Image (cartoon, rainbow, N blue to C red):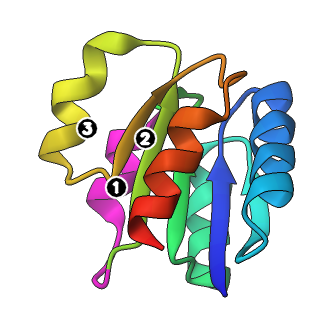
Amino acid sequence: MYKACIIDDESNSREVLELMISENHPEITISGTASNITEGMELIRRHQPDILFLDVEMPGGSGFDLVRQLQEPLPQIIFCTAYGHYAIKAIECSALAYLLKPVSSQKNCTRQLRKQG
């Protein structure tokens, strides 16, 4: 069983992603969600997730700012964003995957998670 957290300022995006994961990946439990960097850091400290679904642009900073604050061991990071131009930066952060919103097609995320599973 894997623990995951979703950090995204868009409530609809969090809900869609959480539903997609619960329907397609019973081995992943969503431990919690957050809508900004500050809440996200607290969520990560509290739950120590194995997987982190992370938006890029949020109130209080970017998903990249959050990644720089994380302590080892790092969770697997999957960026979920509406902005394609951050892909190189995500790769430099050793992201497992980079999904473009809207994440209406479950295939990309499901494929990435199964590779790791």
Above or below residue 36? Residue 21 is: below
**Residue 39 counted in the magenta span:** no
Indicate which disc, 3 or 1, sits on the residue closer to the N terminus: 1
Instruction: Residue at 48%, 74% (x, y): give it.
Output: 117
Q: Specify few, some or many for label 3: CA neighbours under 10 Å numbering under 14, 14-19, or 20 or more.
A: some
In which quadrant of the rendered view does residue 39 lie? bottom right
Looking at the image, residue 3 lies above or below residue 96: below
**Residue designated by label 2:** 63
Is residue 78 in sight in this rendering?
Answer: yes
Image height check: is 68 above or below 7? below
Q: Judging from the image, what secondary structure is the residue with disc 1 in? A: helix
Residue at image x 64%, y 68%?
4
- The reply to whether callout 2 and callout 1 are in contact (CB within 8 Å) is yes
Instruction: Decide which of tag 3 and tag 2 comes sooner along the chain.
Output: 2
Q: Amino acid at mark 1?
A: Val
Task: Categorize mark 2 by other alpha carbons within 10 Å: few (<14), some (14-19), many (20+).
Answer: many
Q: Is residue 54 visible?
A: no
Taking depth in this image into account, of 16 and 55 the one nearest to the observer is: 16
- Residue nearest the observer in this picture, 87 or 43: 87
- The residue singled out by tag 1 in the image is 67
Q: Which residues are magenta?
A: 60-73
Residue lying at 52% horizontally and 14% vertically, measured from the top left: 82
Amino acid residing under circle 2: Gly
On whether residue 65 falls in the magenta region, the answer is: yes
Which residue is denoted by mark 3 in the rendering? 90
Q: Secondary structure at mark 2?
A: helix
Could you tell me which residue is drawn at 40 percent across and 56 percent down?
77
Residue at mark 3 to residue at mark 1: CA–CA distance: 10 Å
Of marks 3 and 1, the one in the foreground: 3
Q: Secondary structure at mark 3?
A: helix
Q: Position of residue 105 (x, y in %)?
A: 67, 24
